[in-house]
């Protein structure tokens, strides 16, 4: 098993199943109906990819799954202002929007948005395949090395690029224009998160400063 992380099959599947259940509640409870068809498309796609990712990495890289299940930071890091967490409303408002018929998003936009969301998720899975040290907390492990291949040869934080696509297009995938407003808060939130990560990586990960010189863009090629 990769690293010193031990992960049982039961725990590996329990966490994503809980996440899938919670996401279902977040989507359908505000809508007050299971006829919220946009939510069914999003939730089913999200669930299939989540289970696939769990099964794939449980076999190929269980250490990655262990890292993805850590939520408590081991160090003091600069956290984004609390109000930026309001971007999570981008997952709650669509149900309310559906209940009160605030938005009329064409079916073709819903479909295209779902495609982009799922491509963003698949891209994240690809990033995890390339970098098994991708963790939910900011840390540098003893044996960790700088990853410069695959998407890391284009931007320094490709996982967040995938997350950005998912966050910005989920409101449209769920048929809501109003949910786009809080969803935009994910942009400053990710920027602050990336800056905190880079401060730690530059100080503690050997070769990271040189990598930054070779790969100047953090999130979006030719932009930032």
Image: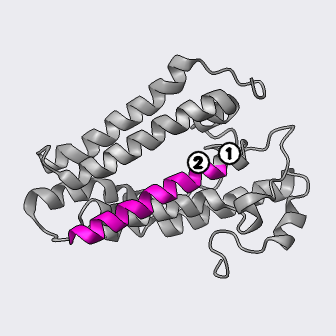
Q: Quadrant of the C terminus?
A: bottom right
Query: Residue sitting at 36 percent across and 60 percent down?
Result: 114
Labelled pair 2, 1 in contact (Cβ < 8 Å):
yes
From this viewpoint, is residue 15 visible?
yes
From this viewpoint, is residue 83 visible?
no
Relative to 52, residue 221 above or below: below
According to the picture, the residue beneath numbered tag 2 turns out to be: 125
Q: Camera-side residue: 118 or 176?
A: 118
Q: State the CA–CA distance, disc 2 to disc 1.
A: 6 Å
According to the picture, the residue beneath numbered tag 1 turns out to be: 129
* Left or right position of 98 against 70: left
Q: Secondary structure at mark 1?
A: helix
**Magenta residues, dominant SS class:** helix
Q: Which residues are magenta?
A: 106-127
Expressed as whole percent of the image width and height from the top left, the position of residue 80 reads 54, 59
Q: Camera-side residue: 141 or 169?
A: 169
């Amino acid at each position: 098993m990769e690293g010193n992380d031990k992960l049982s099959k039961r725990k590996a599947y329990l966490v994503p199943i809980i996440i899938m259940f919670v996401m279902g509640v977040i989507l359908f409870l505000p809508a007050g109906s299971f006829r919220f068809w946009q939510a069914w498309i999003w939730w089913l796609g999200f669930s299939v990819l989540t289970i696939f990712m769990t099964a794939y990495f449980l076999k190929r890289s269980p250490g990655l799954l262990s890292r993805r299940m850590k939520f408590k930071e081991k160090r003091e890091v600069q956290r984004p202002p609390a109000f930026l967490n309001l971007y999570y409303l981008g997952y709650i408002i669509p149900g309310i929007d559906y209940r009160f018929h605030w938005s009329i998003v064409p079916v073709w936009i819903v479909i295209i948005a779902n495609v982009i969301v799922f491509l963003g998720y698949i891209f994240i899975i690809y990033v995890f395949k390339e970098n098994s040290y991708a963790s939910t907390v900011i840390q540098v492990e003893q044996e960790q090395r700088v990853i410069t291949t695959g998407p890391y040869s284009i931007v320094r934080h490709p996982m967040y690029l995938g997350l950005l696509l998912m966050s910005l297009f989920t409101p449209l995938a769920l048929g809501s224009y109003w949910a786009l407003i809080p969803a935009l808060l994910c942009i400053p939130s990710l920027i602050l998160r990336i800056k905190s990560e880079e401060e730690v990586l530059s100080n503690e990960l050997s070769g990271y400063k040189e990598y930054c010189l070779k790969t100047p863009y953090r999130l979006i090629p030719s932009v930032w």
